[in-house]
């Protein structure tokens, strides 16, 4: 295990809060993350934000190949020191949000996993862009703030249920793996964390319904959480037939006119969006 403080002082590194730099120093947590991802030699692992490489090194021991994307140029020298003994790691200096994920991960015969202690300032955009990218991942394992895990695994009708919960369940089966104390990092973050595991799932979707329209409906439905669907989704200018049409569809689905977004499962959102995108017969 690398000595984080020693490396930071050797390279004169100051960690940048705005880049979400909280480095894992607990060897047991690192081991548990890699175990959770069930990494083996068949796997290509994409790691977002390797930092100084504590998790990367452990991933490299188990995986066939690791591609680690780090935005901070100052970390490249310490990273290459930590990873010197591993021939199966490719470090890429880039912003993950500006990276072509298909190009990055193509050409691997085995399975693709993404494992990351995500930078907290950009957790949801990274998760959404991975989910929406369509790259053929088999498993995602993320360490994120506890609140974000709660939202990811939330069930309909609960206070944490949000558009993120619906999006995650559209693509995956999420499961809280374990909690991580803030004492396991340097520097210590202001929040506690948890590890979440997302297994790929394929929901059947009606042919006429585009994913773009479905997610437009989901986002609009949650845009004003306290309002009913009729007053959030129903007021969108792009919704053909407006409130009246929405009322009809809700009734047809056996749902109350006063229902709120937080009561609908992903399957119900799919059905709702499918009905709303159909032209009504004259
Ligand atoms: N993996 C290391 C660990 O567990 O100790 C570091 C995790 S730290 C929470 C997040 C890392 O992501 C930092 O190294 C940070 O520089 C990097 N990072 C932040 N924004 C990024 C981005 N947009 N693209 C790639 N890396 C990013």
Image (cartoon, rainbow, N blue to C red):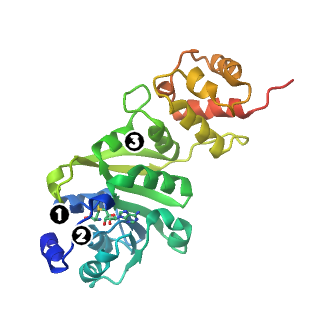
Q: Secondary structure at mark 2?
A: helix
Q: Is residue 252 above or below residue 46?
A: above
Tell me if residue 201 comes above or below residue 140 in the rendering: above
Question: Residue 250: horizontal and vertical position, in percent?
Answer: 63, 20
- The residue wearing badge 3 is 152
Disc on res. 25: 1
Q: Earlier in the sequence, mark 1 or mark 2?
A: 1
Answer with mark 2 or mark 3, whichever residue precedes in sequence.
2
Label 1 CB-ligand 1 distance < 8 A: yes
Instruction: Give residue 94's quadrant in the image.
Output: bottom left
Distance, label 2 to label 3, CA atoms, is 26 Å
SS at mark 1 in the image: loop
Q: Is mark 2 within 8 Å of ligand 1?
A: yes
The image's mark for residue 54 is 2
Is residue 43 shown left or right of residue 191?
Answer: right
Q: Nearer the viewer, residue 278 or 5?
A: 5
Name the residue located 53 percent from the left edge and 61 percent from the top edge: 136
- Residue 115 picture quarter: bottom left
- Residue neighbourhood size for the residue with mark 3, other residues' Cα within 10 Å, grouped as few (<14), some (14–19), many (≥20): many
Q: Secondary structure at mark 3?
A: helix
Query: CA gap, disc 1 to disc 2?
Result: 8 Å
**Percent position of residue 165, x then y:** 44, 39
Which disc is residue 81 wearing? none
């Amino acid at each position: 295990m690398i000595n984080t403080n020693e490396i930071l002082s050797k390279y004169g590194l100051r960690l940048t809060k705005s880049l979400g730099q909280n480095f894992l120093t607990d060897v047991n947590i690192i081991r548990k993350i890699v175990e959770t991802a069930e990494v083996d030699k068949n796997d290509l692992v994409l790691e977002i934000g390797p930092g100084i490489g504590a998790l990367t090194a452990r991933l490299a021991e188990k995986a066939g190949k690791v591609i680690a994307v780090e935005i901070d140029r100052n970390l490249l020298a310490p990273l290459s020191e930590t990873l010197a003994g591993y021939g199966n790691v490719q470090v890429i200096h880039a912003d993950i949000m500006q990276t072509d994920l298909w190009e990055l991960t193509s050409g691997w015969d085995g399975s693709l996993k993404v494992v990351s202690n995500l930078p907290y300032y950009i957790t949801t955009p990274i998760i959404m862009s991975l989910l929406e990218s369509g790259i053929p991942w088999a498993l995602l394992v993320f360490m994120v703030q506890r609140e974000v895990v709660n939202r990811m695994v939330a069930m309909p009708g609960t206070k944490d249920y949000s558009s993120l919960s619906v999006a995650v369940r559209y693509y995956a089966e999420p499961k809280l793996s374990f909690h991580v104390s803030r004492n396991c990092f340097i520097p210590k973050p202001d929040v506690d964390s948890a590890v979440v595991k997302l297994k790929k799932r394929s929901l059947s979707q009606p042919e006429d319904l585009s994913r773009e329209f479905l997610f437009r409906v989901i986002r609009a439905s949650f845009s004003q959480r306290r309002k009913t669907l009729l007053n959030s989704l129903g007021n969108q200018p792009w919704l053909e037939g407006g409130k009246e049409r929405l009322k009809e569809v809700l009734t047809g689905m056996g749902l109350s006119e006063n229902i709120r977004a937080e009561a609908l499962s992903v399957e119900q959102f799919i059905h709702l969006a499918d009905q709303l995108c159909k032209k009504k017969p004259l």
